[in-house]
Image (tube, rainbow, N blue to C red):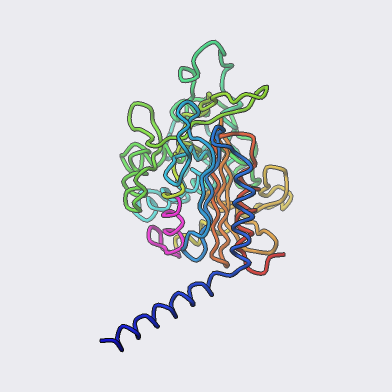
Amino acid sequence: MTFMKNYIVEILAITIIMMSMSCKPETQSEVKKLEAFFSGLASERDPGIAVLVIKDGRRVFERGYGAAYLLTLQPIDSSTNFRLASLTKQFTAAAVMLLVRDGKIKYDDRLTDFWPEFPAYGKDITVLHLLHHTSGLPDYEDLMPPVDPRRPVEEVQVKDSDVLDLLTGTKGGKFPPGTRWDYSNSGYVLLGLIEEKASGLPFHRFLHDRIFAPLGMDGTVAYVPGLNQVSRRAFGYTREKGQWLLKDQSPTSATLGDGGIYSSLNDLAKWDAALRENTLLKADELKLAFTPVIVPDPGAGPVEPDGTPAAYGFGWFLNPWKGRARAWHYGETAGFRTAIERFLDEGVTSIVLCNRDDLEAAALALKAAEAFLDNKD
């Protein structure tokens, strides 16, 4: 018995030593630097930030800073749900891929197949064009009538069906489909409506039943007031004259396919795992989503928000960073800034969610990821 006890103690000691050896001193140093950096961005009385870095499936850095709601000072943590804004597009694209698998949608289906009343230019716009942002559809924000600032924002918000009405009232697109790339919220709103027609389910319900529930993303919702709730919700803020003002909604905050999902670090970690392990969509199905679109004129291809040349697939930017392959996206809406950076060869994913509009989430996500990338420049 004494021999066995000593043997077990030795094994435990060896295990502890091996675990400590696997935690590189330089990584510990980077974690401390990140902690010091992010903690300086938001006090407990400020709206703040949720940060997560995953490496090889493990959460290696996970922190919340600041408050989800300034009236209660509820601290931000890994279960706080933020409005994702355009990070929603990757889920909208995944829903399309699921319906293609089901045989209910084809990538070459045209707008006029779904809405015969759509203007004639819709007969040349396919589902694939919508996914790639090469449809040439006008931006619905440019088509909206002037908003009366005296009315509550919830009364003047545009819904997905309103976007369709605005687009069917136009006579033509911005360019022939497939000839140029132009980031299109209009296209992703229509994808959500197409998914409703094809599945027979409201878009928020399809997302829940086919993506969120199967992956255990229990707090994630495509938010529709009166139909569902956002648990542990972060509210968005803007800073004016030194004061934080609640700015959680805008006239364009009620559309779904382009930006209506709320989610948390916990749930987005499950989403990242599903992409990495091909548990929702198979590798061959995802291959098309992660293949950059090509347009005839390279000068008319995808660009980042600052105009830098980029690459784009289905709801993902695909241009590398410092020579490293990645899939990434950013989100911006009233009171929120979000970003996800997935480095495909290094197995590193970073996610930054902010309930304030004065931070560059994409830059912060890159900073967080870089601390865990091997052979950093």
- Whether the magenta-drawn stretch holds residue 374 is answered as no
Where residue 331 sits: x, y (%)?
A: 57, 41
Q: Nearer the viewer, residue 354 or 142?
A: 354
Where residue 233 sits: x, y (%)?
A: 43, 35
Q: Nearer the viewer, residue 196 or 235?
A: 235
For residue 349, above or below residue 12: above
Magenta segment, prevailing SS (helix, strand or loop): helix
Q: Nearer the viewer, residue 321 or 76?
A: 76
For residue 215, above or below residue 171: below
Residue extending furthest toward the front? 2
Where residue 253 sits: x, y (%)?
A: 50, 29
- The range drawn in magenta is 268-284
Q: Kindly tell me whether residue 121 is visible in this rendering.
A: no
Please tell me in which quadrant of the rendered image residue 306 appears. Answer: top right
The quadrant the N terminus occupies is bottom left
Q: Is residue 44 left or right of residue 9?
A: right
At horizontal 51% and vertical 49% (from top left) the residue drawn is 63
Where residue 9 sits: x, y (%)?
A: 37, 80
Q: Nearer the viewer, residue 35 or 97?
A: 35
- Whether the magenta-drawn stretch holds residue 279 is answered as yes
The quadrant the C terminus occupies is bottom right
